[in-house]
Image: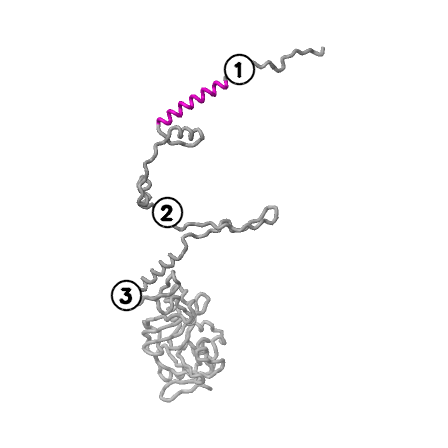
């Protein structure tokens, strides 16, 4: 028999610890309630303990670990207690190890700070509702414990980091404020200082100093560096035309031809004041423009004959029509003379006589 009473009317008892899976009660893994033997209930009743729910301090003296729990039933074998497996892990208990139970009372919790062990807990859409549902199965929380939240066929391990008004609090019939610390494996992508920013031009990470003069000087120096870099770049860029490779349909090898470099101007065209003056017939570069020469009508006619588009005046058009008429008359005369020469020919095809065979 491992159970015993302590002096001064305080309930203390020692039992051998086993997980609840030994009695086929896996649902007890969802809370912090244990199964005690009937003798514990008899002795608690004799002590006229009427505070419910009953809370106990559980201690593993060998490892120096302790926690708190509630009780669900008093149906265990004598000298044996059945605990959730996560509680045995917190106490570093093995199957059949001795554990000490002491009756205690805890203040109602006003504040608790929890820390998930993995960042996948942040993927839960409504962690507040999940936590409220889970804590309905718990009677108390102890700083340093790690309990388990079962959600969507997945286990989330949660550490109890801080609690008020004490290191152990009751969570039954209380309005408790809950705060979450960052998960243990969470890495801030912006580093510990969120005021840092990345300069996309230089690739360096700069942070504002708060001094206006210093920040202005830094901005001026960066602008000057950017301008110097732009000035150092060449005015033109080279483009390799048709730099790829190809294959013949007949399978023969093709001769390799080096791609030709083509200069691509990087400057854009801008209409300047000088260009406007040049279009209006003014000066360019301080030199006066000469008087435009009058067009030669004969030159316009010669260009029109060669098939070029000529923009001339009415006089040039009249002269052109006159010369075209004269050329057409000469052409008609030559054609009529040719017809007369053809009519004087003495040869006529198929003009002979023929005979029948009969």
Q: Residue furthest bottom?
A: 7
Residue 312 shows in this picture: yes
Q: In 3D space, how far apart are the residues under numbered discs 2 and 3 (Cα atoms)?
A: 39 Å
Return the x and y of residue 146 as percentages of the image width and height. 42, 75
Q: Which mark is residue 269?
A: 2
Q: Are marks 1 and 3 in contact (CB under 8 Å)?
A: no
Main structural element of the magenta stretch: helix, strand or loop? Answer: helix
Return the x and y of residue 261 as percentages of the image width and height. 48, 51
Helix, strand or loop at label 3? It is: helix
Q: Which mark is residue 340?
A: 1
Q: Are marks 2 and 1 in contact (CB under 8 Å)?
A: no
Up-down relation of residue 179 to residue 229 (above or below): below
Q: Nearer the viewer, mark 2 or mark 3?
A: 2
Helix, strand or loop at label 1? It is: helix
Helix, strand or loop at label 2? It is: loop
Q: Nearer the viewer, mark 1 or mark 3?
A: 1
Q: Which residues are magenta?
A: 314-335
Q: Which mark is residue 213?
A: 3
Q: Nearer the viewer, mark 2 or mark 1?
A: 1
Return the x and y of residue 47 as percentages of the image width and height. 36, 84
Earlier-in-chain disc, 1 versus 3: 3
């Amino acid at each position: 028999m491992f159970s015993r009473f302590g002096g001064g009317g305080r309930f203390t008892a020692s039992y051998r610890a086993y997980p609840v899976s030994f009695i086929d009660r896996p649902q007890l893994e969802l809370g912090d309630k244990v199964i005690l033997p009937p003798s514990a209930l008899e002795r608690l009743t004799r002590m006229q303990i009427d505070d419910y729910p009953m809370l106990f301090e559980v201690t593993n003296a060998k490892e120096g670990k302790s926690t708190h729990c509630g009780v669900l039933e008093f149906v265990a074998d004598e000298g044996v207690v059945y605990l959730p497996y996560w509680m045995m892990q917190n106490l570093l208990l093995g199957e059949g190890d001795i554990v000490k139970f002491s009756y205690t009372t805890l203040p109602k919790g006003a504040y608790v700070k929890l820390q998930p062990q993995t960042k996948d807990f942040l993927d839960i859409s409504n962690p507040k509702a999940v936590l409220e549902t889970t804590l309905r199965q718990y009677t108390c929380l102890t700083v340093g414990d790690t309990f388990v939240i079962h959600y969507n066929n997945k286990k989330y391990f949660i550490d109890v980091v801080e609690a008020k008004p004490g290191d152990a609090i009751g969570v039954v019939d209380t309005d408790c404020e809950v705060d979450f610390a960052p998960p243990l494996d969470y890495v801030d992508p912006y580093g510990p200082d969120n005021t840092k920013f990345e300069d996309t031009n230089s690739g360096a990470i700069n942070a504002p100093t708060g001094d206006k003069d210093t920040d202005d000087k830094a901005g001026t120096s960066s602008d000057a560096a950017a301008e110097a870099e732009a000035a150092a770049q060449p005015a033109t860029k080279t483009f390799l035309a048709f730099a790829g490779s190809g294959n013949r349909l007949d399978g023969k090898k093709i001769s390799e031809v080096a791609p030709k470099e083509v200069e691509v101007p990087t400057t854009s065209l801008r209409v300047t004041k000088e260009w406007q003056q040049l279009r209006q017939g003014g000066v360019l570069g301080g030199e006066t423009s000469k008087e435009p020469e009058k067009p030669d009508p004969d030159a316009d006619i010669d260009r029109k004959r060669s098939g070029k588009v000529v923009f001339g005046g009415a006089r040039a058009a009249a002269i052109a029509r006159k010369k075209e008429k004269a050329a057409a008359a000469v052409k008609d005369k030559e054609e009529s003379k040719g017809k007369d020469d053809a009519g004087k020919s003495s040869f006529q095809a198929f003009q002979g006589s023929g005979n029948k065979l009969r």
